[in-house]
Amino acid sequence: MRKVTVLLSVAFVLFATQIFAQMAVHESFDYTAGTSLDDSPGTAGNGWDGSWFKQDGTEGFATVAEAGIVWGDLDPIPHQGNELKYSVPGDWAASRYMRPLATTLTDEEGAEYWMSFVYQTSDIPTGNTYYLTKLYHYAEGVDTAEVVAVGKSGGGTTYSCGSGWAGGSGPDVSDVQATTDPVWFVMKIVASGDTSVDRTYMWINPDPAGGVPDTMDADVARDSYIPDAGIDHLAFENGGEMAMDIYFDEIRVGTSWTDVSSEIPTGVSHERKNLPSNFSLAQNYPNPFNPETHISFDLTEQARVALIVYNAKGQMVRTLVNEVMNSGTHYVTFNGSNLPSGVYFYKLQTNHSTQVKKMILMK
Protein backbone atom coordinates (compact mmCIF):
# COMPACT_ATOMS: atom_id res chain seq x y z
CA MET A 1 0.00 0.00 0.00
CA ARG A 2 2.86 2.36 0.86
CA LYS A 3 4.43 1.73 -2.56
CA VAL A 4 1.14 2.57 -4.31
CA THR A 5 0.80 5.77 -2.28
CA VAL A 6 4.33 6.84 -3.17
CA LEU A 7 3.75 6.13 -6.86
CA LEU A 8 0.52 8.13 -6.82
CA SER A 9 2.29 11.02 -5.11
CA VAL A 10 5.09 10.96 -7.68
CA ALA A 11 2.53 10.86 -10.50
CA PHE A 12 0.74 13.89 -9.10
CA VAL A 13 4.01 15.81 -8.72
CA LEU A 14 4.91 15.01 -12.33
CA PHE A 15 1.44 16.11 -13.45
CA ALA A 16 1.66 19.36 -11.49
CA THR A 17 5.18 20.01 -12.81
CA GLN A 18 4.03 19.47 -16.38
CA ILE A 19 1.08 21.83 -15.96
CA PHE A 20 3.29 24.43 -14.25
CA ALA A 21 5.81 24.32 -17.08
CA GLN A 22 3.09 25.00 -19.64
CA MET A 23 1.17 27.67 -17.75
CA ALA A 24 2.59 31.11 -16.86
CA VAL A 25 -0.44 32.71 -18.49
CA HIS A 26 -0.35 36.49 -18.57
CA GLU A 27 -1.82 39.36 -20.56
CA SER A 28 -0.66 42.95 -20.11
CA PHE A 29 -2.39 44.32 -23.24
CA ASP A 30 0.96 45.30 -24.77
CA TYR A 31 -0.65 46.17 -28.09
CA THR A 32 -0.63 49.46 -29.96
CA ALA A 33 -2.77 52.06 -28.18
CA GLY A 34 -6.14 52.33 -29.90
CA THR A 35 -6.21 48.66 -30.98
CA SER A 36 -9.75 47.31 -30.80
CA LEU A 37 -10.29 43.93 -29.22
CA ASP A 38 -12.66 43.27 -32.13
CA ASP A 39 -9.51 43.03 -34.29
CA SER A 40 -8.53 39.86 -32.37
CA PRO A 41 -5.09 40.92 -31.07
CA GLY A 42 -2.74 38.38 -29.59
CA THR A 43 -1.36 35.07 -30.82
CA ALA A 44 -0.35 31.78 -29.27
CA GLY A 45 2.19 32.37 -26.51
CA ASN A 46 2.44 33.54 -22.90
CA GLY A 47 0.19 30.63 -21.94
CA TRP A 48 -2.46 31.36 -24.59
CA ASP A 49 -3.45 29.21 -27.55
CA GLY A 50 -4.62 32.02 -29.82
CA SER A 51 -6.14 35.49 -30.12
CA TRP A 52 -8.94 37.30 -28.36
CA PHE A 53 -12.32 36.97 -30.06
CA LYS A 54 -15.79 38.37 -29.42
CA GLN A 55 -17.99 35.50 -28.34
CA ASP A 56 -21.17 37.50 -27.83
CA GLY A 57 -22.61 41.01 -27.72
CA THR A 58 -21.93 44.40 -29.29
CA GLU A 59 -18.68 45.45 -30.95
CA GLY A 60 -16.66 48.60 -30.36
CA PHE A 61 -16.54 48.73 -26.56
CA ALA A 62 -13.00 47.50 -25.87
CA THR A 63 -9.81 49.31 -26.98
CA VAL A 64 -6.22 49.38 -25.75
CA ALA A 65 -5.34 52.53 -23.78
CA GLU A 66 -2.00 53.88 -22.51
CA ALA A 67 -3.33 54.76 -19.06
CA GLY A 68 -6.42 54.60 -16.90
CA ILE A 69 -5.61 52.60 -13.80
CA VAL A 70 -4.16 54.71 -11.00
CA TRP A 71 -2.00 52.04 -9.40
CA GLY A 72 -1.14 53.91 -6.18
CA ASP A 73 -1.32 51.38 -3.34
CA LEU A 74 -1.31 48.57 -5.91
CA ASP A 75 2.15 49.50 -7.23
CA PRO A 76 3.74 46.38 -5.65
CA ILE A 77 1.63 44.26 -8.01
CA PRO A 78 3.72 43.53 -11.12
CA HIS A 79 2.35 45.47 -14.10
CA GLN A 80 3.64 46.70 -17.42
CA GLY A 81 2.54 48.02 -20.79
CA ASN A 82 -0.91 49.34 -21.68
CA GLU A 83 -4.38 48.55 -20.37
CA LEU A 84 -7.77 47.70 -21.79
CA LYS A 85 -10.42 50.43 -21.72
CA TYR A 86 -13.96 49.11 -21.90
CA SER A 87 -16.45 51.91 -22.58
CA VAL A 88 -19.92 50.61 -21.73
CA PRO A 89 -22.63 52.85 -23.24
CA GLY A 90 -25.32 51.75 -20.78
CA ASP A 91 -28.86 50.84 -21.85
CA TRP A 92 -28.08 47.17 -21.12
CA ALA A 93 -25.49 46.89 -23.88
CA ALA A 94 -22.95 44.16 -23.18
CA SER A 95 -20.30 42.00 -24.79
CA ARG A 96 -18.11 39.03 -23.95
CA TYR A 97 -14.57 38.45 -25.22
CA MET A 98 -12.75 35.14 -24.85
CA ARG A 99 -9.27 33.74 -25.35
CA PRO A 100 -8.19 30.07 -25.40
CA LEU A 101 -5.70 28.77 -22.84
CA ALA A 102 -2.76 26.76 -24.13
CA THR A 103 -3.23 24.23 -21.31
CA THR A 104 -6.60 22.82 -20.25
CA LEU A 105 -7.14 22.98 -16.49
CA THR A 106 -8.44 19.53 -15.57
CA ASP A 107 -10.20 18.22 -12.49
CA GLU A 108 -7.23 16.44 -10.94
CA GLU A 109 -7.50 15.84 -7.20
CA GLY A 110 -5.59 18.45 -5.22
CA ALA A 111 -4.68 20.58 -8.24
CA GLU A 112 -4.77 24.33 -7.58
CA TYR A 113 -5.62 26.89 -10.24
CA TRP A 114 -5.02 30.58 -9.53
CA MET A 115 -6.20 33.67 -11.42
CA SER A 116 -5.60 37.38 -10.83
CA PHE A 117 -6.35 40.66 -12.59
CA VAL A 118 -7.04 44.35 -11.90
CA TYR A 119 -10.19 46.41 -12.51
CA GLN A 120 -10.83 50.14 -12.05
CA THR A 121 -13.99 52.02 -13.03
CA SER A 122 -14.74 55.67 -13.77
CA ASP A 123 -17.88 55.63 -11.58
CA ILE A 124 -19.31 53.64 -8.70
CA PRO A 125 -21.42 51.01 -10.48
CA THR A 126 -25.10 50.49 -9.85
CA GLY A 127 -26.50 47.12 -8.86
CA ASN A 128 -27.34 46.16 -12.42
CA THR A 129 -23.95 47.03 -13.91
CA TYR A 130 -21.43 44.21 -14.11
CA TYR A 131 -17.80 43.56 -15.08
CA LEU A 132 -16.59 40.01 -14.68
CA THR A 133 -13.65 37.79 -15.55
CA LYS A 134 -14.68 34.19 -16.15
CA LEU A 135 -13.25 30.72 -16.64
CA TYR A 136 -15.01 28.44 -19.13
CA HIS A 137 -15.08 25.24 -21.02
CA TYR A 138 -16.01 26.56 -24.44
CA ALA A 139 -16.45 25.14 -27.94
CA GLU A 140 -18.08 27.07 -30.76
CA GLY A 141 -21.57 25.79 -31.50
CA VAL A 142 -21.64 23.76 -28.28
CA ASP A 143 -23.09 24.75 -24.93
CA THR A 144 -20.50 26.47 -22.81
CA ALA A 145 -19.82 25.60 -19.18
CA GLU A 146 -19.10 28.64 -17.03
CA VAL A 147 -17.07 27.61 -14.00
CA VAL A 148 -16.68 30.90 -12.16
CA ALA A 149 -17.21 34.65 -12.63
CA VAL A 150 -15.10 37.06 -10.56
CA GLY A 151 -15.62 40.80 -10.19
CA LYS A 152 -18.74 42.97 -9.89
CA SER A 153 -21.80 40.90 -10.74
CA GLY A 154 -25.25 42.16 -11.60
CA GLY A 155 -27.93 42.60 -9.00
CA GLY A 156 -25.76 43.78 -6.12
CA THR A 157 -23.33 46.50 -5.09
CA THR A 158 -20.45 44.35 -3.77
CA TYR A 159 -17.76 42.21 -5.39
CA SER A 160 -18.53 38.54 -5.89
CA CYS A 161 -17.10 35.22 -7.03
CA GLY A 162 -19.57 32.80 -8.52
CA SER A 163 -22.28 33.42 -11.06
CA GLY A 164 -22.69 36.45 -13.29
CA TRP A 165 -25.88 37.45 -11.48
CA ALA A 166 -25.16 36.94 -7.82
CA GLY A 167 -27.59 39.51 -6.49
CA GLY A 168 -27.10 41.14 -3.14
CA SER A 169 -26.54 38.11 -0.91
CA GLY A 170 -25.53 34.47 -0.87
CA PRO A 171 -22.31 32.42 -0.71
CA ASP A 172 -20.97 34.04 -3.90
CA VAL A 173 -21.12 37.58 -2.50
CA SER A 174 -18.49 39.41 -0.46
CA ASP A 175 -19.12 42.33 1.87
CA VAL A 176 -16.61 44.53 -0.02
CA GLN A 177 -18.45 47.43 -1.66
CA ALA A 178 -17.62 48.27 -5.28
CA THR A 179 -15.72 51.57 -5.59
CA THR A 180 -13.80 53.61 -8.16
CA ASP A 181 -10.49 52.52 -6.60
CA PRO A 182 -8.35 49.99 -8.47
CA VAL A 183 -8.98 46.46 -7.20
CA TRP A 184 -6.71 43.43 -7.46
CA PHE A 185 -8.79 40.27 -7.58
CA VAL A 186 -7.15 36.95 -6.72
CA MET A 187 -8.98 33.63 -6.99
CA LYS A 188 -8.03 30.00 -6.31
CA ILE A 189 -9.85 26.79 -7.25
CA VAL A 190 -8.90 23.56 -5.47
CA ALA A 191 -9.94 20.62 -7.65
CA SER A 192 -11.65 17.62 -6.08
CA GLY A 193 -10.81 15.09 -8.78
CA ASP A 194 -14.29 13.57 -8.84
CA THR A 195 -17.96 14.54 -9.08
CA SER A 196 -17.91 16.35 -5.73
CA VAL A 197 -17.54 20.08 -5.54
CA ASP A 198 -14.32 22.00 -6.20
CA ARG A 199 -13.62 24.63 -3.54
CA THR A 200 -13.16 28.22 -4.74
CA TYR A 201 -11.75 31.24 -2.88
CA MET A 202 -11.51 34.94 -3.73
CA TRP A 203 -9.47 37.69 -2.09
CA ILE A 204 -9.74 41.46 -2.66
CA ASN A 205 -6.36 43.27 -2.64
CA PRO A 206 -4.30 40.68 -0.74
CA ASP A 207 -0.72 41.67 0.07
CA PRO A 208 1.43 40.49 -2.88
CA ALA A 209 4.43 40.25 -0.55
CA GLY A 210 2.53 38.69 2.34
CA GLY A 211 2.78 35.06 1.31
CA VAL A 212 0.00 32.72 0.27
CA PRO A 213 -3.29 34.23 1.50
CA ASP A 214 -5.17 32.27 4.14
CA THR A 215 -8.38 30.67 2.92
CA MET A 216 -9.91 31.58 6.28
CA ASP A 217 -9.43 35.24 5.30
CA ALA A 218 -11.00 34.88 1.84
CA ASP A 219 -13.65 37.45 0.99
CA VAL A 220 -15.62 34.65 -0.70
CA ALA A 221 -15.39 30.88 -0.14
CA ARG A 222 -17.76 28.80 -2.23
CA ASP A 223 -18.25 25.61 -4.24
CA SER A 224 -17.86 25.29 -7.99
CA TYR A 225 -17.56 22.50 -10.54
CA ILE A 226 -14.82 21.94 -13.10
CA PRO A 227 -16.48 20.25 -16.09
CA ASP A 228 -15.28 16.86 -17.33
CA ALA A 229 -13.74 18.58 -20.36
CA GLY A 230 -11.81 20.97 -18.10
CA ILE A 231 -11.31 24.73 -18.30
CA ASP A 232 -9.90 25.89 -21.62
CA HIS A 233 -10.95 29.55 -22.05
CA LEU A 234 -10.77 32.79 -20.10
CA ALA A 235 -13.35 35.49 -20.79
CA PHE A 236 -14.43 38.86 -19.53
CA GLU A 237 -17.93 40.23 -19.85
CA ASN A 238 -19.02 43.79 -19.16
CA GLY A 239 -22.32 45.59 -19.50
CA GLY A 240 -25.55 46.61 -17.82
CA GLU A 241 -27.65 49.68 -17.34
CA MET A 242 -24.97 52.26 -16.51
CA ALA A 243 -22.66 54.12 -18.92
CA MET A 244 -19.08 54.06 -17.59
CA ASP A 245 -15.45 53.31 -18.41
CA ILE A 246 -13.94 50.10 -17.06
CA TYR A 247 -10.16 49.62 -17.10
CA PHE A 248 -8.82 46.07 -17.06
CA ASP A 249 -5.24 44.83 -16.82
CA GLU A 250 -2.73 42.15 -15.82
CA ILE A 251 -4.57 38.89 -16.30
CA ARG A 252 -2.56 36.03 -14.86
CA VAL A 253 -3.42 32.34 -14.52
CA GLY A 254 -1.27 29.66 -12.96
CA THR A 255 -0.98 26.79 -10.53
CA SER A 256 0.37 28.65 -7.50
CA TRP A 257 0.28 31.94 -5.60
CA THR A 258 3.73 32.68 -7.02
CA ASP A 259 2.33 32.55 -10.56
CA VAL A 260 -0.04 35.44 -9.88
CA SER A 261 2.01 37.53 -7.44
CA SER A 262 5.66 37.40 -8.58
CA GLU A 263 7.49 39.35 -11.28
CA ILE A 264 5.93 39.07 -14.72
CA PRO A 265 8.14 36.77 -16.83
CA THR A 266 8.44 39.38 -19.60
CA GLY A 267 8.53 42.32 -17.24
CA VAL A 268 11.16 44.46 -15.59
CA SER A 269 13.79 43.18 -13.19
CA HIS A 270 16.16 45.29 -11.14
CA GLU A 271 19.77 45.11 -9.97
CA ARG A 272 21.16 47.61 -7.44
CA LYS A 273 24.35 45.97 -6.15
CA ASN A 274 26.64 48.43 -7.98
CA LEU A 275 25.07 51.81 -8.65
CA PRO A 276 25.87 53.10 -12.15
CA SER A 277 27.78 56.34 -12.63
CA ASN A 278 26.03 57.34 -15.87
CA PHE A 279 22.54 57.38 -17.33
CA SER A 280 22.66 54.93 -20.24
CA LEU A 281 20.57 52.74 -22.53
CA ALA A 282 22.24 49.53 -23.73
CA GLN A 283 21.87 47.91 -27.13
CA ASN A 284 19.27 45.18 -27.04
CA TYR A 285 20.45 41.57 -27.16
CA PRO A 286 20.04 39.55 -29.29
CA ASN A 287 19.75 41.86 -32.28
CA PRO A 288 18.27 40.97 -34.75
CA PHE A 289 15.78 39.01 -32.65
CA ASN A 290 12.74 36.72 -32.99
CA PRO A 291 10.52 37.11 -31.08
CA GLU A 292 12.16 38.17 -27.78
CA THR A 293 15.03 40.49 -26.98
CA HIS A 294 16.41 42.00 -23.79
CA ILE A 295 16.97 45.68 -23.03
CA SER A 296 18.88 47.08 -20.06
CA PHE A 297 19.40 50.63 -18.84
CA ASP A 298 21.17 52.42 -15.99
CA LEU A 299 19.72 55.12 -13.74
CA THR A 300 21.96 57.22 -11.51
CA GLU A 301 19.06 58.44 -9.40
CA GLN A 302 15.39 57.74 -8.77
CA ALA A 303 13.31 59.01 -11.68
CA ARG A 304 10.07 58.59 -13.57
CA VAL A 305 11.02 56.46 -16.54
CA ALA A 306 9.33 55.79 -19.86
CA LEU A 307 10.68 53.09 -22.17
CA ILE A 308 8.70 53.08 -25.41
CA VAL A 309 9.03 51.15 -28.68
CA TYR A 310 8.28 52.82 -32.02
CA ASN A 311 8.06 51.45 -35.54
CA ALA A 312 10.00 52.87 -38.51
CA LYS A 313 7.20 55.36 -39.16
CA GLY A 314 7.58 56.81 -35.68
CA GLN A 315 4.33 55.30 -34.44
CA MET A 316 4.30 54.05 -30.86
CA VAL A 317 3.73 50.30 -30.69
CA ARG A 318 4.51 49.35 -27.11
CA THR A 319 5.07 50.99 -23.71
CA LEU A 320 7.46 48.74 -21.80
CA VAL A 321 7.95 50.93 -18.74
CA ASN A 322 6.06 53.94 -17.39
CA GLU A 323 6.75 54.30 -13.68
CA VAL A 324 9.06 55.72 -11.03
CA MET A 325 12.21 53.62 -10.64
CA ASN A 326 15.11 53.64 -8.21
CA SER A 327 18.73 54.11 -9.24
CA GLY A 328 20.41 50.99 -10.55
CA THR A 329 20.47 48.72 -13.55
CA HIS A 330 17.12 47.57 -14.88
CA TYR A 331 16.28 44.81 -17.35
CA VAL A 332 13.26 44.48 -19.64
CA THR A 333 12.23 41.67 -21.99
CA PHE A 334 10.45 42.79 -25.16
CA ASN A 335 8.32 40.26 -27.05
CA GLY A 336 7.56 41.15 -30.66
CA SER A 337 5.48 38.07 -31.51
CA ASN A 338 2.47 40.26 -32.36
CA LEU A 339 4.45 42.62 -34.60
CA PRO A 340 5.67 42.34 -38.23
CA SER A 341 9.33 42.05 -39.15
CA GLY A 342 11.15 45.34 -39.53
CA VAL A 343 13.18 48.09 -37.91
CA TYR A 344 12.03 49.40 -34.54
CA PHE A 345 13.35 52.07 -32.19
CA TYR A 346 13.23 52.04 -28.41
CA LYS A 347 13.44 55.31 -26.46
CA LEU A 348 14.36 55.72 -22.82
CA GLN A 349 13.22 59.02 -21.33
CA THR A 350 13.35 60.67 -17.91
CA ASN A 351 12.72 64.27 -16.89
CA HIS A 352 16.34 65.13 -17.70
CA SER A 353 17.61 62.69 -20.32
CA THR A 354 16.58 60.80 -23.46
CA GLN A 355 18.32 58.05 -25.40
CA VAL A 356 17.19 56.13 -28.49
CA LYS A 357 18.50 52.92 -30.08
CA LYS A 358 17.52 50.81 -33.07
CA MET A 359 16.62 47.12 -33.11
CA ILE A 360 15.54 44.69 -35.84
CA LEU A 361 12.75 42.13 -35.58
CA MET A 362 13.44 39.37 -38.12
CA LYS A 363 10.89 36.57 -38.45
Image (spheres, helix red, strand yellow):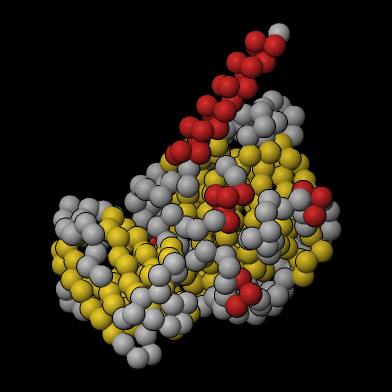
Which residue is outermost to the right? 169
Residue found 17% across the figure and 63% down from its top: 360
Closer-to-camera residue (123/90) = 123
Give the quarter of the image for residue 12: top right
Which residue is outermost to the bottom? 352
The x and y percentages for residue 79 are: 49, 66
Quadrant of the snapshot with the N terminus: top right
Residue 268 in view: yes
Q: Is residue 47 above or below residue 118?
A: above
Residue 306 in view: no
Give the quarter of the image for residue 164: bottom right
Q: Is residue 18 above or below residue 42?
A: above
Which residue is outermost to the front? 274
Closer-to-camera residue (177/45) = 45
The x and y percentages for residue 43 are: 34, 51
Residue found 55% across the figure and 32% down from its top: 16
The x and y percentages for residue 337 are: 29, 55
Residue found 50% across the figure and 58% down from its top: 263
Q: Is residue 195 left or right of residue 90?
A: right
Residue found 47% across the figure and 77% down from its top: 326
Q: Is residue 217 left or right of residue 144?
A: right
Q: Is residue 27 left or right of residue 6?
A: left
Give the quarter of the image for residue 292: bottom left
Q: Is residue 56 above or below residue 58?
A: above
Closer-to-camera residue (31/300) = 300
